[in-house]
Amino acid sequence: MNSTIEQTPLFTIESQDPNSMARTGFLDLPHGRVETPVFMPVGTGATVKAVTQDEVADMGFRLILANTYHLYLRPGADVVSQFGGVHRFSAWPHNILTDSGGFQVFSLAANRKISEAGVRFRSHIDGSAHDFTPESVVELQAGYGSDIQMALDICTPYGIDHAAAVEACDMTARWAKRAVTRRAELTNESELFASYRGELFPIVQGNFFKDLRQRSVEQLLELEPRGIAIGGLSVGEPFSVFTDMLAHTAALIPPKLPRYVMGIGTPEYIVAAVEQGIDMFDCVFPTRAGRNGGVFTRHGRIALKNARFRYDEEPIDTNCDCFTCRRYSRAYLRHLFIAGEMLGPMLATRHNLRFLGKLLEDIRSAIRSGTFTALAATVREAYPPRTGVIDSTENTENRV
């Protein structure tokens, strides 16, 4: 279905772990090569909160996420268009993946109406009414210059019945087909989009029913996608349900396609995803936690505001090579947070992003050397998966 778009190799598998589905590879995108598995920092409004673009790049990231819904409302597609896309507008020279906004609309359940045509919603900013269709969302993301754009989907909450899940699953597939058709049309009808080479990934839904997950994957594979995202996970389900459904869904997707699980970004979830052959993931949690004093260490997560760090001369993590850990003590960082100084959130965010960047570097190295199982065990010891329900403020895409 994409025959009118000039195709180049997108994803190359480099190595495979002998004891799991974990693999390394790389994505060749319009703004450069990206090694996988990869964590994408979330820059919802064309900025990763509390850090500059240069700092994000210096930490090794070459792919970040922005959000169609938020950019549409503010600053507006017309502003971004004037700059020729998000890259120039935000002074980010590397790759950008844009979410379709489907999750944000999902979180506006009281202020939206879904129909076959698309979704009508009210802005969380001023209450004004707006419409998204599968076609308009493709056009918006092409205008943003997205290196990878996502098809509009219907994300459903944990606990709905089978009939409701079927309806959302099938409508998501129909919307994906319309998105693919519109993506193919763009380069033929407008000089504005003639040079656009961004990829379009559809999103697997099906809620927590295995038959519907299979149905969704089969429907989307008919569209001959170049990559697939797995949505509708980490929305309030127990960790065991998350891992079971992830393993089931990932196994249905052909290995040649890059696989992206949306909305996960803590060490235990990353390891669980990589183990199932997932190549890409994103989450607001690392930056959100950093802004509130929560930081990752190789021994687990700690809260810098805790009184026990008042006299602590150690860095956040003695093994970390980030700017924060090279220069500042836990005591000083605690002081910044207690005093309400903006430098505290900035430094903690730098650390969290670099911690995850380094974790992914270590994961890729371990997969290549056949030692991923040992690394995963070490991560799980420090970050034991919880047996209860996922905290919906933790492993979720950015809510409005």
Image (spheres, rainbow, N blue to C red):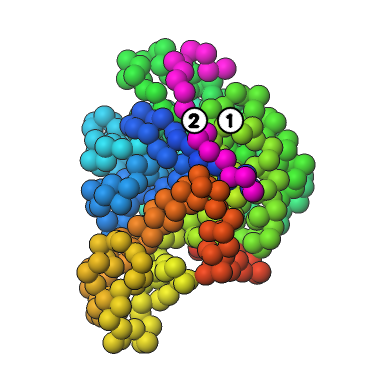
Q: In this orientation, which residue lies closer to the viewer: 100 or 79? A: 100
In the image, residue 103 sits, relative to residue 185, either above or below, namely: below
Q: Can residue 149 be found in the magenta stretch?
A: no
For image coordinates 24% across by 35% down, the residue present is: 88
The kind of residue on which mark 1 rests is Lys
Location of residue 388 in the rendering, given as x and y in whole percent from the top left corner: 65, 69
Location of residue 205 in the rendering, given as x and y in whole percent from the top left corner: 64, 42
Tell me where the magenta segment starts and ends, as one range.
Answer: 1-19
Of the residues under marks 2 and 1, which one precedes in the sequence? 2
Residue 131 as seen in the image, left or right of residue 354: right
Determine crowd level at label 1: few under 14, some 14-19, many 20+ residues with C-alpha closer than 10 A.
few
Residue 354 as seen in the image, left or right of residue 83: right
The residue at which mark 2 appears reads as 11
Q: Where does the N terminus fall, quadrant-wise?
A: top right
The residue at which mark 1 appears reads as 256
- The answer to whether any part of residue 109 appears in the image is no
- The answer to whether any part of residue 343 appears in the image is yes
Q: Quadrant of residue 78?
A: top left
